[in-house]
Image: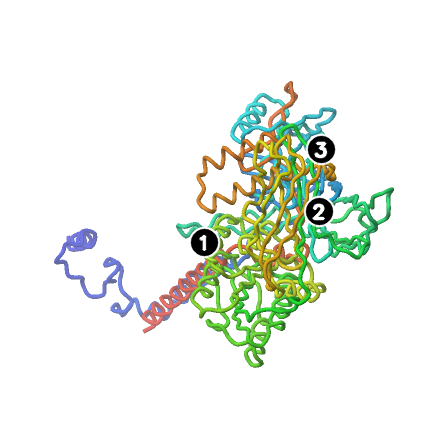
Amino acid sequence: MTDVSLRTRCVSRPPRFRRPPGRNPAHPCVPSAGTDPAFARRAKEDPEMKNDRSRTARRIACVILFLVSLSLLPPRVAADPPPPDAPPAAEPVDPSVAGSGALLWKSARGLVPLPVVDMQVDLSVTGLMVRGNLVQTFHNPTSQVIEAIYVFPLPEAAAVDSMEVRLGDRLIRAVLREKEEAKAIYERAKQEGRKAGLVAQHRPNLFTTSVANINPGETIVVALRYLGEVSYEDGEFGLVFPLTFTPRYTPARSDGSVPQQGIGESFVKPENPQAPRARIDVRIDSGVALENVRSASHPIRWEPEGAAWRVRLEGGPVVADRDFVLRWRLRRDDRPEGTVFVEDREDGRYGLMMLLPPLPESAAGQGLPTETLFVIDVSGSMDGPSIAQAREALLQAIGRLRPGDTFDILKFNDRNESFRERFLPARGSELDEARAWVASLRASGGTEISPALVRGMRMLADADPWPAQRLVLITDGAVDNEDEVLAQVTRLLGKARLHIIGIGSAPNRYLVRRLAGVGRGACEFIGNVAEAGRRMGSFLERIDRPVMSDLSLAWEEASSAATSPIETYPQRLPDLYAGEPLFVSFRMGPSGGAARASLTGQVAGGPIRIDLGVAPDTARGSGVATRWARAKVEDLMDGLRRGADEPTVRREVIGVAQRFDLVTRYTSLVAVEEFPSARGAATTRRVTGALPDGSTLLEGTLPQTGTSGPLLTRLGLFLLLAGAFVASLRRLGLRWRRNAA
């Protein structure tokens, strides 16, 4: 009776129950080793109980150590692609980080890559215009019907105006529609089993092509045509064609979250056999002989071909792992002060004007004392050769500071840090310390460029008044929030100048050039350490020379019968540095005849004026009208950052795009075949693109262009599990000592 009563009390635990001596506080029905002498003696003497405690401790330790080891494993990176008959295994990727010319399947899991077969780039230069023809050939090696997404970068000034899709023996030509309408047409055709293509602008210099219902074994040829323009700098012409791009970093959202990065399985190293390859052919019709034709990016060979010049890659196709850069000079001593090309259409006469202001000899080399803030990108995308190029560029810039100048340095990744938090005089000890600080810079973390620029602009605004303030940014521009960055610079820069150094084999040239434009500064690109000294020297000399500012362009038409004013773009003319041209697109009425343009501005020596005439017999140039349309669209889109009404901008952009068949933020090209031809449902197959040359993003430690969040998460998990491990051992140790007492 007593035993039954005691067991009942142990289970019910009434409030005033007093535990009998020798019972365990946690389990009152179990004897406590600390108070039960018999149990304690057994715990000391019984080897089986000792073995049980030892095995339990080992099991707990093994489980915790296993979890700790899992927390320290690096993220899974891209491996070599599986053989053609392997089952699909690719992870979805984001179009903005999809890689060079990547053909992506649109599967239920997202966009999944597919192999690239061939890429052909044909560029034709006539005067100042570049007509580009990009042909990429893909093959469906599977036994499934697919829908594919084709992602490709183009030059930042490119205007895409034509697309054709060849599927077997069928040729599908695209038509322009508003983006939503084009998407609806494409989706309807896809559901009906008809082949269809859709070209849309994903970013200002990144486009996507969707191709629906590709049958097994079919070869897909996507041909896109675009219009671009040459650059001109210090007597040298040039062009760039991007073959890949650096994966873009997505900054934290306003709620503090960071969107998932899509780099993981969309890239391979350039030496991988699956990396895309390209053939490049350039024809330059300059009208005069060329000299000093060279490429800092690829070995080339060039030769005359009739009245033109032909440039080809030396050795055939190359891996698409860097921008193709070509420069040349005309064989003549004089430099053009102005050149005009026109193109006539039914709706008017369109023109392109290049004005090159002369630099007075007396002003060369003179400059005011400057207050310079250098801002250098040390994020993960800069790891490898890029950070070495950035350090060398910054050291070159520091070495060119003059007595009387002041400076400071700001480095940034997902955080930013100043060298001294104040502007220092450019003299011996300060310069030596700055050089040592720069030499110690290493790359890691995310590319939070916006907070760094905001801090830098505020540092300049809070500093004492100075004759000339400038911010020099050194970066690869690998971010996808370009509009936000440009809007902040437009709002906060004030009277300071913003100059940009683009770093790496595939920088974001659109962002670099647009930042320099809104910052009334200049830009330069450095693709390898060997050319850093020469290009930085030329760049620093250029920005040290007097700038031509307060530019305005006035027109005077010879005929009083003109029915409409001359419309020019850009409407807000940028400041010019010596050796830099001003490109102006203009449109006259259908009856437009002779006209004269007068460019006025200020240089260090006083006011300057350049006159240039447009005559009825002015040289014709193909693509001039399309160039005007693209310039107008760009000017309208810039208005959004200045507070323009978005519906009004949209309506005007669509109107221009429809007249010239331009792909814009609001318009797309869509092509649909007449009859259904699909033979089944789609499945997935992976693709790979080539990382930019020198990138370490696939190497073991995986330096990321994202934030250090994943690393901190793993570190936090490690510390949490390690703490649990230590606590478990401590509890086991204390229990063993109590039992042994």
Q: Amino acid at mark 2?
A: Thr
User: Percent position (x, y) of residue 561?
Assistant: 60, 31
Q: Earlier in the sequence, mark 2 or mark 1?
A: 2
Q: Nearer the viewer, residue 639 or 310?
A: 639
The residue carrying mark 2 is 339
Q: Residue furthest top?
A: 675
Q: Which amino acid type is shown beneath numbered disc 1?
A: Arg
Q: Kindly identify the amino acid type of the residue bearing the numbered disc 3.
A: Val
Q: Residues within 10 Å of mark 2 (few under 14, many from 20)?
A: some
Question: How far across and down, in percent of the image, does residue 308 sit?
Answer: 83, 44
Q: Secondary structure at mark 3?
A: strand
Instruction: Find disc 1 in the rendering and name its residue.
Output: 491
Check if mark 3's residue and mark 2's residue have beta carbons within 8 Å: no
Reading the chain from its start, which is encountered first: label 3 or label 2?
3
Q: Quadrant of residue 586?
A: top right
Residue under pointer 3: 221
Q: Nearer the viewer, mark 3 or mark 2?
A: 2
